[in-house]
Image (spheres, helix red, strand yellow):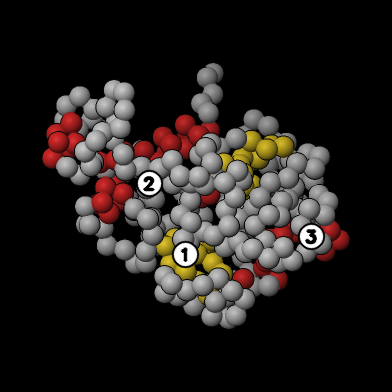
Amino acid sequence: MTRLPYSLVLALAFAATPLQAAGLPDTGQVTCYNDTTADVVPASSAASIASDAGTHPGQDCRFGRDAAAAASALPKTGAGARGFDYTKVANNGTLLAAGATLGTAATDWACTLDNVTGLIWEVKTAAGTDPRYFGHTYTWYNSDAATNGGNAGGTGSNTCNATLPGGLCNTQAFATAVNLAALCGYSDWRMPTARELFSLFVADGSNPGIDPTYFLYTPATSRYWTGSTYVSSADAAFLVDFRSGSIPGGSKSGDTRYNLRLVRGGPF
């Protein structure tokens, strides 16, 4: 039996969903192409639209939320680039204006709500002594046999500046710490699924491929853990690479470490 790459499976799953389905994120891809290069005309122009019925049909640039945003025909609850729609959330859980700044006060920005998927995401910080510092890395660990895919992973070592108990820097320990702190008023933070995390990826060639206004301090070379275990190999979990948009695997064994961005709500 032929096994499709997970990134292709994910893309097909998105593509198979009706365009107007509620909660469907878009890709950020707004450039159309001919046989050899990018079109010189905007996707919303009559010439580009005519191509959709001709030699270069069905391109992502002409459809969905991104195309509607380019045509100024997409109502948004919050703001964000292209078809993305985000709202900042304060430490105390209240919704904020787009200009709110990151901080530790009750009414400072700390999380981001995706108004399309309904998920709320942890926002990283620049302070090395903060448990949510963007540079901290973690081993994959989940002791719940019902959700760990048959392999709990490793408890890790001190790769997060002693911000977690016992210096055990793993995904479960980090989620537990964030839940104890009730970030943005919630105590149900978790690792995202591969599908959820990939919904943040912006496929426009930027590096990192994520909205920089609503997701500060995302390293250009970073890969982020997901809670999704490989079906064919329980000792690996999927990652999302925000440089390439790929969804590779990372080993749960040993001291393999990657970044982590927690989510709540859903599942999406």
Please give the label number shown on residue 63. none
**Residue 39 on image: x %, y %:** 26, 33
Q: How far apart are marks 3 and 2 (CA)?
A: 35 Å
Residue 58 percent across, percent down from the top left: 26, 33
Q: Which residue is drawn at 74% across and 66% down?
A: 129
Left/right placement of residue 168 relative to residue 79 reads right
Residue 161 is tagged as 3
Residue 112 appears in the rendering: yes
Q: Is mark 2 on a helix, strand or loop?
A: loop
- Quarter holding the N terminus is top right
Closer mark to the observer between disc 3 and disc 1: 3
Instruction: Identify the residue shown where x is 51% and y is 72%.
Output: 101
Task: Looking at the picture, tell me which residue is in the foreground, 142 or 65.
Answer: 65
Give the Cα separation between the discs numbered 2 and 1: 18 Å
In the rendered view, does 37 fall on the left or right side of 189?
A: left
Work out whether mark 3 precedes mark 1 in sequence or the reverse, and give the earlier one: 1
Q: How many labels does the image show?
A: 3
Q: Nearer the viewer, residue 184 or 219?
A: 219
Residue 114: image x %, image y %?
Answer: 44, 60
Identified by mark 1, the residue type is Leu
For the residues labelled 3 and 1, the Cα–Cα distance comes to: 28 Å
Please say if 132 is above or below 239. below
- Report the residue marked by disc 2: 28
Residue type marked 2? Gly
Disc 3 is placed on an element classified as: loop
Q: Which residue is drawn at 31% across and 49% down?
A: 66
Task: Give the labeled residue for mark 1.
Answer: 113
- Which residue type does callout 3 highlight? Asn
